[in-house]
Image: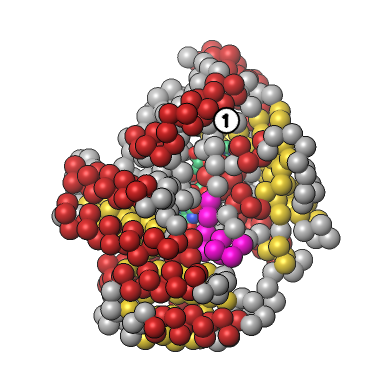
């Protein structure tokens, strides 16, 4: 064993190779509480592409599984350690290599934190638009590997819509460059898209050429609408999209989430309303857009709908939305799910979640990126229980199947990871599964890249 590790240390002199059990323990899991991690052999903290390449070459020679890791904020168990693996962290590869403002492009290493890149873009009047709620703690590499979404994605698209090219280290240590710096380009297969959302199973991303967008020069106008029920709020979200209003954000929270936030932060929301819809418009006609959203909310039965012009009020509402997960987590262990349905089916999906909660006697608190039809039902259970109770899995199973029946998908942005593997074939079907397997075998014949995740 120590020969193997000595060889690794010799091959990655600039990287940190960690075997201290306490440190290893902190790298065993990501933010997914419902999976059982294995015991890693070591953690490699890479500082450069060369470190990543040397680690993958060593791993192939010694048949050691590799678990790529960014910020460790994943919610599908994608960065969970497996027995005897090397956890390969790109979190210290934090250089923003270039901001080319004239071409609206940035080149960033995989460990750059999402919000740091956005701040660097802001200095040039630009923005990096994909903004997962974890934007202050998750990395570009992890965002790319999960094709992360976020609050602004309803208008500006998900991570895939902002990537032009990648530098990837393949199994065995070979270096691949995909894509280009141009906004158009169709030479060859779209390998960039293949790696986006591949959850560390096809290669390790070391840097990316990313698309920036002009930063809106006004602060968005916000509308907050309270509803007597979750279904009415979902209908309002559907109506807003159908009316061709183009919100820059459209977020929904149910009563369980609002109560959890209120119990913690005494916000006042949650007492009078059963659901809260927050919309924003950052266009030149923002007040008009927000006004239209307000009208549509009132038409669907909103009991209050207020347009706020000031930055402070808008920020308060967004802070409320960002408190959703930590507030619900205070109630117990939360299995955070991530189904996505066509936006016209949002009210049906809300009804199916409520039915699953009732049928299985499970407490579910739901937030949604409503403008994308992407719902996060959080299945909460007692902290003291040794494992996920059977009714929670039964309710989750019902919710996943409902999403597929409604023409949706198991995961809008968190990935398959370890959590959703058993439902994967139900969505993909036999032919697609076979193509996935063929791609995996071509790129990782020894099966050492993030085994047990995704496929
Ligand atoms: C409070 C909170 C809010 C969140 N909100 C959102 C949200 O709004 N939208 C959203 O999409 N997600 C959200 N997430 C989930 C999570 O933040 C995202 O999935 C994020 O993209 C993960 O990035 P990370 O750097 O933490 O990656 P990790 O969790 O470390 O890894 C995620 C996956 O990517 C792989 N990976 C990591 N780095 C690389 C690399 N360099 N090369 C290849 N593979 C790699 C890992 O193996 C793993 O499969 C949230 C999580 C939390 C805790």
Q: Residue at x 48, y 25 (%)?
A: 434
The answer to which of 70 and 220 lies nearer the viewer is: 220
Which residue is the extreme one toward the right? 102
The percent coordinates of residue 387 (x first, y second) are 22, 40
Q: Residue at x 69, y 24 (%)?
A: 174
The percent coordinates of residue 208 (x first, y second) are 69, 44
Q: Quadrant of residue 421?
A: top left
Q: Does residue 139 appear left or right of residue 21 in this picture?
A: right
Instruction: Tell me if residue 410 can be seen.
Output: yes
**Residues drawn in magenta:** 148-156
Q: Residue at x 51, y 74 (%)?
A: 243
The residue carrying mark 1 is 202
Crowding at mark 1 (Cα within 10 Å: few <14, some 14-19, many 20+): many
The answer to which of 248 and 177 lies nearer the viewer is: 248
Q: Is residue 248 above or below residue 405?
A: below
How many dots with numbers? 1
Q: Is residue 155 magenta?
A: yes
Q: Is residue 256 above or below residue 291?
A: above
Q: Quadrant of residue 353?
A: bottom left
Q: Does residue 363 appear left or right of residue 84 in this picture?
A: left
Q: Is residue 429 magenta?
A: no
The percent coordinates of residue 369 (x first, y second) are 45, 63
Q: Quadrant of residue 332?
A: bottom left
Instruction: Tell me if residue 13 can be seen.
Output: no
Q: Does residue 97 appear left or right of residue 196 in this picture?
A: right
Q: How is colour applied across the structure in the image? A: secondary structure
The percent coordinates of residue 201 (x first, y second) are 53, 31
Q: Secondary structure at mark 1?
A: loop
The answer to which of 430 and 259 lies nearer the viewer is: 430
- Which quadrant: the C terminus? top left
């Amino acid at each position: 064993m120590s020969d193997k590790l000595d060889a690794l240390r010799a091959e990655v002199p600039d990287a940190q190779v960690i075997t201290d059990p306490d440190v290893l323990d902190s790298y065993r899991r990501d933010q997914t509480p419902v999976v059982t991690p294995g015991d890693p052999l070591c953690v490699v903290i890479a500082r450069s592409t060369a470190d990543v390449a040397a680690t993958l070459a060593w791993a192939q020679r010694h048949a050691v599984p590799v678990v790529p890791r960014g910020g460790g904020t994943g919610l599908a168990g994608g960065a969970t350690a497996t027995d005897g693996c090397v956890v390969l962290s790109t979190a210290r590869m934090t250089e923003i290599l270039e901001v080319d403002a004239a071409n609206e492009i940035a080149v960033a290493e995989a460990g750059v934190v999402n919000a740091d890149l956005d701040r660097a873009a802001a200095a040039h009047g630009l923005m990096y638009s994909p903004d997962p709620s974890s934007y202050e703690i998750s990395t570009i590499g992890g965002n790319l590997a999960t094709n992360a979404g976020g609050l602004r994605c309803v208008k500006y698209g998900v991570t895939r819509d902002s990537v032009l090219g990648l530098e990837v280290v393949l199994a065995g240590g070979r270096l691949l460059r995909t894509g280009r710096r141009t906004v158009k380009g169709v030479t060859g297969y779209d390998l960039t898209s293949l790696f986006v959302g591949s959850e560390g199973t096809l290669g390790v991303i070391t840097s990316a050429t990313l698309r920036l967008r002009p930063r809106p020069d006004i602060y968005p106008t916000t509308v907050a609408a309270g509803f007597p029920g979750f279904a009415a709020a979902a209908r309002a979200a559907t109506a807003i999209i159908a009316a061709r209003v183009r919100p820059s954000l459209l977020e929904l929270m149910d009563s369980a989430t609002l109560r959890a936030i209120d119990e913690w932060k005494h916000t006042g929301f949650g007492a009078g309303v059963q659901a809260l819809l927050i919309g924003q418009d950052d266009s030149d006609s923002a007040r008009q857009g927000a006004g239209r959203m307000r009208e549509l909310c009132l038409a669907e039965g909103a009991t209050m709908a207020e347009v706020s012009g000031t930055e402070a009020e808008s920020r308060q509402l967004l802070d409320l939305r960002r408190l959703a997960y930590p507030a619900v987590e205070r109630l117990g262990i939360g299995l955070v799910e991530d189904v996505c349905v066509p936006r016209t089916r949002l009210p049906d999906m809300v009804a199916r979640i409520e039915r699953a909660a009732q049928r299985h006697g499970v407490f579910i608190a739901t937030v949604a990126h409503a403008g994308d039809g992407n719902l996060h039902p959080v299945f909460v259970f007692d902290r003291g229980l040794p494992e996920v109770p059977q009714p929670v899995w039964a309710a989750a199973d019902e919710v996943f199947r409902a999403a597929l029946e409604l023409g949706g998908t198991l995961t809008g942005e968190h990935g398959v990871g370890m959590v959703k593997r058993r439902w994967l074939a139900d969505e993909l079907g036999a032919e697609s599964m076979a193509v996935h397997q063929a791609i995996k075998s071509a790129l990782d014949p020894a099966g050492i890249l993030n085994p047990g995740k995704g496929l």
